[in-house]
Image (cartoon, rainbow, N blue to C red):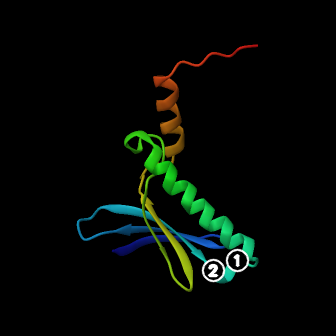
Amino acid sequence: MKRIYSSELAYSEIILLQDHEENKFAAKRIKKRKLSADYLHDFVRNEIAIQHSLSNFSQNGEFIVKVEDYYEDDDCYLMVMEYSPSPDYFEQRLENVLSNHKYYIII
């Protein structure tokens, strides 16, 4: 995979990756040295586990960003996810959910 974009945040980096077949993926790289407390490592592992289980639970990945893979080494945690080129990804998925379901408000 080759890196085609990255953006560094407080303790993590978002990376746009492309494989040899030109499929794109988003990766969240979390630097262990920037996590000051042990409980933060547990928080990160829980985030990855929850995201992974949700992506397996979702029907055809319709409403959740799918976790493609996960790696951990001495320096970082890396979560590889499906890539969405749209900045309105969440809003588009939410509109899809709302348009396919009827909700009633009971007062």
Residue 11 is labelled as: none
**Residue at the limit of the structure toward the bottom, as seen here:** 74
Rendering coords of residue 95 (x, y %): 51, 31
**103 left or right of 19 in image:** right
Q: Which residue is mark 2?
A: 32
**Which residue, given by chain and number where applicable, does mark 1 sit on?**
35
Q: Residue 82, image x and y in percent?
A: 41, 56
Furthest-left residue in this view: 21
**Residue 10 visible (yes or no):** no
Residue at x 57%, y 84% (from the top left corner): 75
User: Residue at the spot x=39%, y=62% of the render?
Assistant: 25
Q: Decide if residue 30 is on the left or right side of residue 55.
A: right
Mark 1 touches mark 2? (CB < 8 Å): yes
Q: Is residue 58 above or below residue 44?
A: above
Give how far apart the Cα atoms at labels 1 and 2 are.
5 Å
Q: Amino acid at mark 2?
A: Lys
Quadrant of the rendering where the N terminus is positioned: bottom left
Tell me: residue 23, above or below residue 74: above
Question: What kind of residue is marked 1?
Answer: Leu
Indicate the position of residue 105 as horizontal and vertical percent values.
Answer: 68, 16
Quarter of the picture holding the C terminus:
top right
**For the point 51% across and 49% down, which residue is it?**
54
- Residue 72: x, y in percent? 51, 77
